């Protein structure tokens, strides 16, 4: 008996729905992604297996690193209203008058590292320009001109005057290759102002077995 041959047609899959899903996911990730803010003083934090999330508000960060062979310290505040009030208090202390426009622009800056006499020039720059590595020399913190101590003090004063419910939290973000005496100098400065509890920012790594 003769065998009947069945014609075989090539199978086809409609990919329209798959493409729609792929574009929807791509659109979602683009719209929800947060752009990484360029750092004026990039540091590589030491690794740690301990995970403690830093507070989203009421936090002051002291970034300690080295750029162009020089040790530098940058000062950052999470809350915009505290930034504005702190700038006002520092301006009064050092005799530097900031305009409302400069104050508003400063409130958008997450961190900075210049003497207060040079702060106006940094505020006037675009974000991409002011965050160029090596541009900001760091905040003075020597025995004759310790502006970092004053920024710490006035930030706490601003927090109180604004009627915040809790004291400011402090975090030290140091480069893994940073020399210990520089970090200890920051710790001593905090303890001199009765700040005995603070965080050390580290990078995550896997546990050792």
Image: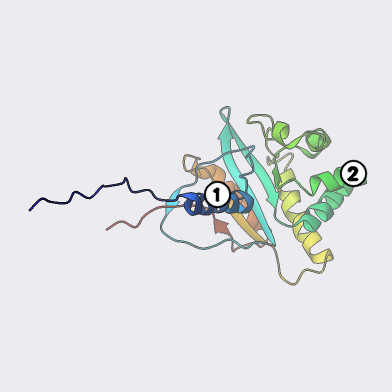
Please report whichever mark, 1 or 2, sits nearer to the chain's N-terminal start.
1
Residue depicted at x 86% and y 47%: 103
Residue depicted at x 26% and y 47%: 8
Residue 23 image label: 1
Verify CB contact (< 8 Å) between mark 1 and mark 2.
no
Q: Residues within 10 Å of mark 1 (few under 14, many from 20)?
A: few
* Numbered disc 2: secondary structure: helix
Query: Would you place residue 55 above or below residue 46 in this image?
Result: below
Do we see residue 109 in this rendering?
yes
Q: Quadrant of the C terminus?
A: bottom left
Do we see residue 187 in this rendering?
no
* Numbered disc 1: secondary structure: helix
Here the colouring is: rainbow
Query: Would you place residue 140 above or below residue 185 in this image?
Result: above
Residue 56 in the image: x percent, y percent?
65, 61
Query: Would you place residue 195 above or below residue 88 in this image?
Result: below
Residue 129 in the image: x percent, y percent?
72, 31
Residue 131 image label: none
The quarter of the displayed image where residue 123 is located: top right
- Frontmost of labels 1 and 2 is 1
Task: Report the front residue among 105 and 189.
Answer: 105
Residue depicted at x 89% and y 41%: 96
Residue 101 image label: 2
> Residue 69 vs residue 134: left or right?
left
In this view, the residue farthest toward the left is: 1
Residue 185 in the image: x percent, y percent?
59, 47
Residue depicted at x 91% and y 42%: 97
Q: Residues within 10 Å of mark 2 (few under 14, many from 20)?
A: few
Q: Label 1 vs label 2: CA separation?
A: 41 Å
Residue 121 in the image: x percent, y percent?
81, 33
């Amino acid at each position: 008996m003769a065998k009947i041959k069945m014609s075989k047609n090539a199978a086809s899959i409609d990919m329209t729905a798959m493409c729609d899903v792929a574009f929807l996911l791509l659109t979602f990730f683009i719209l929800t992604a947060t752009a990484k803010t360029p750092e004026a003083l990039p540091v590589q934090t030491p690794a740690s297996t301990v995970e403690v999330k830093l507070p989203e508000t009421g936090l002051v960060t002291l970034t300690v690193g080295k750029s162009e062979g020089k040790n530098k310290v940058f000062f950052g505040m999470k809350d915009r209203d505290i930034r504005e009030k702190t700038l006002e208090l520092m301006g009064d202390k050092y005799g530097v008058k900031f305009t409302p426009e400069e104050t508003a622009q400063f409130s958008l800056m997450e961190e900075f590292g210049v003497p207060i006499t040079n702060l106006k020039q940094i505020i006037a720059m675009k974000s991409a320009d002011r965050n160029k590595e090596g541009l900001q020399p760091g905040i003075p913190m020597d025995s004759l001109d310790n502006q970092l101590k004053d920024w710490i003090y006035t930030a706490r004063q601003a927090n109180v005057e604004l009627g915040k419910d809790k004291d400011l939290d402090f975090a030290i973000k140091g480069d893994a290759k940073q020399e210990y005496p520089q970090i200890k100098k920051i710790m001593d400065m905090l303890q001199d102002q009765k700040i005995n509890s603070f965080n050390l920012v580290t990078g995550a790594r896997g546990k050792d077995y």
